[in-house]
Image (cartoon, helix red, strand yellow):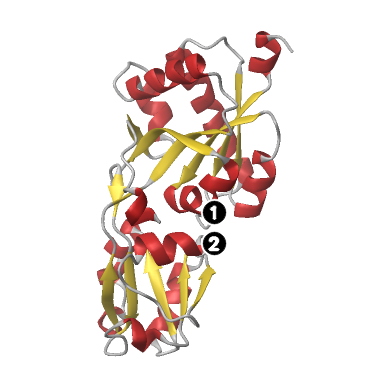
Amino acid sequence: MTTLLAASLATLVFCAPGYPGGAGDAQPLVDDFAHAAIAAAGWPPGSLAAVYDPTEEGGLEKLRSADAVLAFVPYPFYVEHAARLHLTPLVQADVADIGVQQRWTLVAKAGRVSDPASMAGYTILSVAGYAPDFVRHNALDGWALPADVKIEPTGQVLSALRRVSTGEPVAALLDQAQTAALPSLPFAKELNTVRQSPQLPVALIVVVDSRVAAGRARALQAGLLKMGHAPGSTDTLGALRLRGFVLPTLPSPAAAR
């Protein structure tokens, strides 16, 4: 296969499990991003396509395709699947109103949870619930959950918090934006912050299974790092709630387990 043919088949998979938004709505935005990224990197026009999937299963299915050379994923997805999919971080996203890192917050019914043992029999609901390794070993690092705690994904965070407030044996693990909205809830006094994570990356662009040659990957990395500073890229990034990219700074292997 020629280099040109290989380039024409390259795809960037955007996968954002748990967050609202349909593939149809996002597709024009990720198309624009792909065009801007290859222009910044000096890749040939049309050498990178983009596709969006709002589900873990759908994203994994797309990443099995040989043309899926890159992925834009939340950090929980990376933690859960990096080893199996051979994901190599290229850049770290700087997300509008959040930054390059965020803290995750465990919220429970006020007065119910004081230590890990008091969560026996609980279910943790979160947009990151599809990634139990992330929940247990990153978001709740140092908080040894009982073996019978269940971790489940949900995109209905408000409903999850209502369940918490009524005293069901559930807790909610919230990202930074969701945590910031807590004080505005009419039942906020029924909720208590139990545990907060260290600062963790928000999202990454990664190379999938070394499917991008090293030289092309370096050129793309350099191009992405310029986005947000180069004329014309601000609107493209802003449509995806991004300000730009930085070099990856990931937790140590000991912290990430």
Q: Residue 17 carries which label?
A: 1
Q: Please report the residue visible at 61 percent of the width from the left and 15 percent of the height from the top.
A: 46
Q: State how many labels appear.
A: 2
CA gap, disc 2 to disc 1? 8 Å
Q: Which mark is residue 193?
A: none
Q: Nearer the viewer, residue 215 or 47?
A: 215
Q: Which residue matches tag 2?
A: 130
- Lower sequence index among marks 2 and 1: 1
Left/right placement of residue 184 relative to residue 13 reads left
If the image is split into quadrants, where does the C terminus sit?
A: bottom left
Residue type at mark 1?
Pro
Q: Please report the residue visible at 25 percent of the width from the left and 82 percent of the height from the top.
A: 189
Q: Please report the residue visible at 43 percent of the width from the left and 49 percent of the height from the top.
A: 75
Q: What element carries label 1?
A: loop
Q: Please report the residue visible at 26 percent of the width from the left and 58 percent of the height from the top.
A: 198
- Whether tag 2 and tag 1 are in contact, CB under 8 A, the answer is yes
Left/right placement of residue 55 relative to residue 75 reads right
